[in-house]
Image: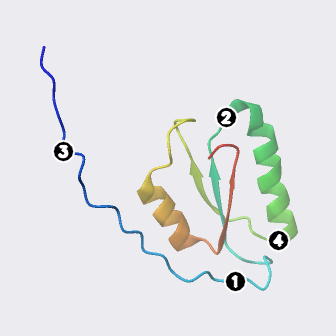
Amino acid sequence: MSILLFDPVCEPEVIDRRAERKLAGLKGKKVGYVFNQHKSALTFWHTLEQEVGRTFGSFDGHRVYKTNTWAPAPKSEIDELVRNSDYALVGVGA
């Protein structure tokens, strides 16, 4: 058996923060969804997406449905959602 020691000094991640974009409204805007697919909320989430589509005309939304309920969504998928959406709905532990 051996003990491995790691140097705790590292470079902090620098996050590129852009200015917030304010929307005048949601009608016709591209929506993004991030959902963890927990079975207790499947029916609710499906109904929410349908209602958002009917109310705001956002049927072609970009979706990130996590395959692991408890793990964070992959950064590459979230980056793609940000590029392809005007706004996002994130819910149920996502």
- Residue highlighted by disc 2: 38
Look at discs 4 and 3 and give the one toward the viewer.
3
Which mark identifies residue 70? Answer: none
- Residue highlighted by disc 1: 22
Of pointers 4 and 1, the one earlier in the residue sequence: 1
Q: Residue 33 in the image: state x and y as whole percent.
A: 65, 57
Of pointers 2 and 3, the one earlier in the residue sequence: 3
Of pointers 1 and 3, the one earlier in the residue sequence: 3
Q: Residue 18 in the image: state x and y as whole percent.
A: 51, 80
Which mark identifies residue 56? Answer: 4
Tell me if label 2 and label 3 are in contact, CB under 8 Å: no
Tell me if label 4 and label 2 are in contact, CB under 8 Å: no
Q: Residue furthest top?
A: 1
Gap in angstroms between the C-alphas marked 2 and 1: 31 Å
Look at discs 4 and 1 and give the one toward the viewer.
1
How many other residues sit within 10 Å of disc 3, few (<14), some (14-19) or many (≥20)?
Answer: few
Q: Quadrant of the N terminus?
A: top left
Look at discs 2 and 3 and give the one toward the viewer.
3
Tag 4 secondary structure: helix
- Residue highlighted by disc 3: 7
What amino acid type is highlighted by mark number 1? Answer: Lys
Gap in angstroms between the C-alphas marked 4 and 1: 17 Å
Query: Which residue shows up at 87% across the image and 67% down it?
Result: 55
Gap in angstroms between the C-alphas marked 4 and 2: 25 Å
Quadrant hosting residue 12: bottom left
Tell me if label 1 and label 3 are in contact, CB under 8 Å: no
Quadrant hosting residue 56: bottom right
